[in-house]
């Protein structure tokens, strides 16, 4: 029936828009975390370079720096992948709208 066809079209539109919104939110969360890491790295490096920091503390801070840097690289890679996915999902959404 026409009603069911319209319902399924609307449902598909909702699902596609939801996928776009979810992917955009994932990108935003990762970019926010990347900004937080940059702030953390600045503080960690300042502490590591401080003359008041012991050798043991400095070693722990350098390990923390390495962990944060690795996390940032991972997040950056994920953002790149998600941006490709977002573009694909936006294209799917626009193609669906064009068919409606």
Image (cartoon, rainbow, N blue to C red):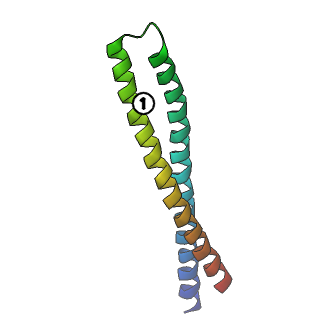
Residue shown at 52%/41% (left/top)? Answer: 34
Query: Which is nearer the eye, 37 or 73?
Result: 73
Relative placement, left or right, of 45 versus 87 is left
Which residue of the protein is positioned furthest toward the left in this rendering? 56
Relative placement, left or right, of 90 versus 72 is right
Query: Which is nearer the eye, 74 or 8?
Result: 74
* Tally of numbered tags: 1
Residue shown at 56%/71% (left/top)? Answer: 88
Residue 50 vs 23, above or below: the answer is above
Q: Position of residue 14 (x, y in %)?
A: 56, 70
Residue 50 in sight in this render = yes
The image quadrant that residue 32 belongs to is: top right
The image quadrant that residue 10 belongs to is: bottom right
Relative placement, left or right, of 69 versus 83 is left
Residue shown at 47%/48% (left/top)? Answer: 75
Query: Which is nearer the eye, 36 or 68?
Result: 68
Residue shown at 50%/49% (left/top)? Answer: 76
Which residue is label 1 attached to?
Answer: 65
């Amino acid at each position: 029936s026409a009603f069911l066809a319209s319902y399924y079209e609307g449902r598909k539109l909702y699902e596609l828009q939801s996928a776009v919104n979810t992917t955009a939110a994932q990108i935003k969360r990762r970019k926010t975390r990347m900004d937080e890491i940059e702030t953390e790295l600045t503080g960690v490096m300042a502490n590591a370079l401080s003359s008041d920091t012991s050798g043991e503390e400095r070693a722990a801070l350098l390990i923390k720096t390495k962990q944060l840097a690795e996390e940032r690289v991972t997040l950056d890679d994920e953002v790149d992948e998600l941006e490709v996915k977002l573009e694909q999902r936006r294209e799917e959404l626009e193609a669906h709208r064009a068919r409606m």
